[in-house]
Image (cartoon, rainbow, N blue to C red):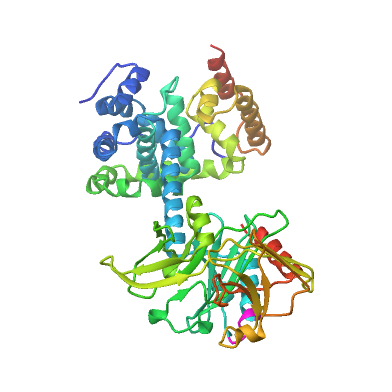
């Protein structure tokens, strides 16, 4: 080998090149300084790792903000298990509702104790499911093809399969009402029986879920409320008169006992049946209330709904579906698994 | 303005306070050494010139955060990183490098083209052998033998212990002499270690 690795060539850069490079370097660092001057002094005073950490933190914050905004705008996708639950429940409850796209399931509105999920079908119609399992069990299912015609495609929570279940703890679920604003309307509010008005937060795609404040819960449990829909100008365009729910305790599969305590003003008895028409009082079964509003129904007839009625057998509570114990426990278990 | 006879560490401190001219003085002081190091690691004078600029731009980028005990070994450390990641480093400063005046470069090199080509050829031959060494040994060899740093300075530049520097150096020498690529010449290594013990 003819070379010496310990003695490599050492060419010098010509002085003129060094001068060019020096001038270029100083120009570049002054450019950097000018750019840096636009950055706040406190930021530049931090060490580089800290500056990087700050930038990362701000970037992550922005990403989180964007994610939150996206969830607000697009709705939080429901987990897979919920999507299939929802699909199964919708299919089971509303047979005509075909073509549901379970991957479109979203959280469309929430309150402290309940969540409203929505799922679309191929035509853009929807089914919704209301689930609340933190206190008792609230479960409701509705598909808009099964709804009475409402201007603008609106929907009220009363026109659905709903059940308020008193679970083993004996705690009653809170009152919640849900619905959907028609296109063109932007706000909703609740007017309670004591005259109190509470605003309603509108969720995704004009759906809303309203849970009266703790102070108003006893009022909402005792008497109907009015939900008002408002336009941009703040004018009430439509209103719904909504009966209170009646929490029920279901025992046995098949049902061997239904019980509950009624607080609703003017209530005389509990009616169970399959028809709400003019001949309802002849075909349906009734159970009187005790002095304290309690009732117990042993081996009740197999019927579709149950409601509290007045002395003329007019419904005073939501028309609720009956559930056997196996079914509500299954709903409860599913609901409690949800995030 | 060109500064002379200033302590490099003082110049660095002034540069940290935002004194661009002090940084220019550091460039005057150390650019030949950094250029030589870049050339000996690449065997390409044009590339070495760009890499030298990148080393000083990178040093400026970090000047507020670094207070090296000794500036030159730290600059060699920056240069070693730049050489390890040439593509990434030059990409970061691509726009800055585009702004280097080009016309002057051609004039500078016309006169000594033959000399330049010869130096590059000889360096390529050396690198062909040196590159058979693992990268860490190449770095130690280049810094200690070619650039004349002590093992302590090399340790500072590479962020390793002096013992590691010495063992890498001995392995490099054994490898080169054993393969017949270099004469058995303990003098440069001894010089490196002697300087270190001073």
Is residue A9 in sight in this rendering? no
Query: Quarter of the image containing the C terminus of chain A?
Result: bottom right
Above or below: residue A53 compared with residue A308: above
Q: From the viewer's perspective, is A32 left or right of B188?
A: left
Q: Measured along the vertical axis of the image, is residue A18 above or below residue B2? A: below
**The furthest residue to the top:** B198
Is residue A38 placed above or below A165 in the rendered structure? above
Q: Position of residue B60 (x, y in %)?
A: 35, 33
Image coordinates of residue A128 in percent, x first then y, are 54, 72
Q: Main secondary structure of the magenta part?
A: loop
**Which residue: 36% across, 20% down?**
B8
Residue B166 lies in quadrant: top right
Quarter of the image where one finds residue A52: top left
Q: Quadrant of the N terminus of chain A?
A: top right
B114 horizontally vs A98: left or right: left
In the foreground, B64 or A105:
A105
Q: Would residue B151 be visible to someone looking at this image? A: yes
The residues colored magenta run: A92-96
Is residue A74 positioned above or below B1 on the image?
below
Reply yes or no: does residue A94 show up in magenta.
yes
Q: Report the side of A63 relative to A245 (left or right).
A: left
Q: How many labels sit on residues?
A: 0
Q: Between A13 and A320, which is closer to the camera in this rendering?
A: A320
Residue A2: image location, x then y, percent:
55, 39
Residue lying at 52% horizontally and 25% vertically, measured from the top left: B156
Q: Specify whether residue A20 is painted magenta.
A: no
Image location (x, y in percent) of residue B127: 53, 42
């Amino acid at each position: 080998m003819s070379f010496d690795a310990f003695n490599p060539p050492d060419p010098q850069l010509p002085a003129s090149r060094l001068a060019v490079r020096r001038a270029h370097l100083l120009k570049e660092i002054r450019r950097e300084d000018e750019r840096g001057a636009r950055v706040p002094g406190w930021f530049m005073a931090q060490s580089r790792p800290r500056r990087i950490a700050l930038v990362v933190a701000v970037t992550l914050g922005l990403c989180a903000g964007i994610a939150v905004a996206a969830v607000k705008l697009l709705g939080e996708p429901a987990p897979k298990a919920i999507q299939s639950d929802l699909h199964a429940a919708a299919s089971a409850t509303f047979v005509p509702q075909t073509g549901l796209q379970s991957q479109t399931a979203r959280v469309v509105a929430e309150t402290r104790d309940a969540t409203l999920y929505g799922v679309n079908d191929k035509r853009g119609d929807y089914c919704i499911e209301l689930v609340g399992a933190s206190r008792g069990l609230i479960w409701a299912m509705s598909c808009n093809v099964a709804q009475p015609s409402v201007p603008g495609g609106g929907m009220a929570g009363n026109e659905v399969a709903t059940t308020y279940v008193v679970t083993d703890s004996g705690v009653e679920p809170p009152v919640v009402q849900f619905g959907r604003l028609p296109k063109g309307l932007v706000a909703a509010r609740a007017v309670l029986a004591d005259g109190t008005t509470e605003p309603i937060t509108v969720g995704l795609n004009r759906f809303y879920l309203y849970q009266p404040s703790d102070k108003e819960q006893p009022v909402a449990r005792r008497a109907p409320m009015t939900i008002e829909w408002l336009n941009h100008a703040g004018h009430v365009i439509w209103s719904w008169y909504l009966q209170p729910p009646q929490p029920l305790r279901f025992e046995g599969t098949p049902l061997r006992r239904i019980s509950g305590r009624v607080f609703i003003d003017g209530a005389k008895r509990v009616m169970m049946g399959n028809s709400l028409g003019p001949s309802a009082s002849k075909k349906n079964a009734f159970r009187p209330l005790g002095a304290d509003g309690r009732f117990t129904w042993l081996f009740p007839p197999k019927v579709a709904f149950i409601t509290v009625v007045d002395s003329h057998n007019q419904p005073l509570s939501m028309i609720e579906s009956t559930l056997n114990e196996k079914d509500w426990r299954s709903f409860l278990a599913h609901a409690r698994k949800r995030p | 303005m060109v500064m002379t006879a200033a302590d490099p560490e003082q110049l660095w401190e002034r540069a940290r306070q935002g004194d661009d001219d002090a940084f220019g003085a550091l460039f005057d002081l150390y650019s030949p050494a950094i250029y030589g190091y870049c050339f000996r690691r690449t065997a390409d004078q044009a590339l070495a010139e760009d890499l030298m600029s990148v080393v000083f731009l990178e040093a400026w980028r970090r000047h507020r955060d670094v207070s090296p005990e000794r500036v030159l070994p730290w600059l060699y450390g920056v240069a070693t990183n730049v050489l390890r990641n040439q593509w990434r480093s030059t990409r970061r400063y691509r726009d800055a490098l585009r702004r280097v005046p080009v016309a002057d470069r051609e004039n500078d090199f016309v006169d000594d083209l033959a000399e330049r080509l010869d130096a590059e050829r000889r360096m390529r031959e050396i690198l062909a052998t040196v590159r058979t060494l693992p990268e860490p040994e190449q770095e130690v060899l280049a810094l200690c033998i070619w650039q004349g740093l002590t093992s302590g300075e090399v340790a500072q530049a590479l962020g390793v212990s002096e013992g590691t520097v010495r063992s890498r150096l001995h392995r490099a020498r054994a490898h080169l002499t054993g393969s017949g690529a270099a004469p058995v010449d303990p003098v440069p290594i001894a010089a490196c270690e002697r300087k270190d013990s001073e």
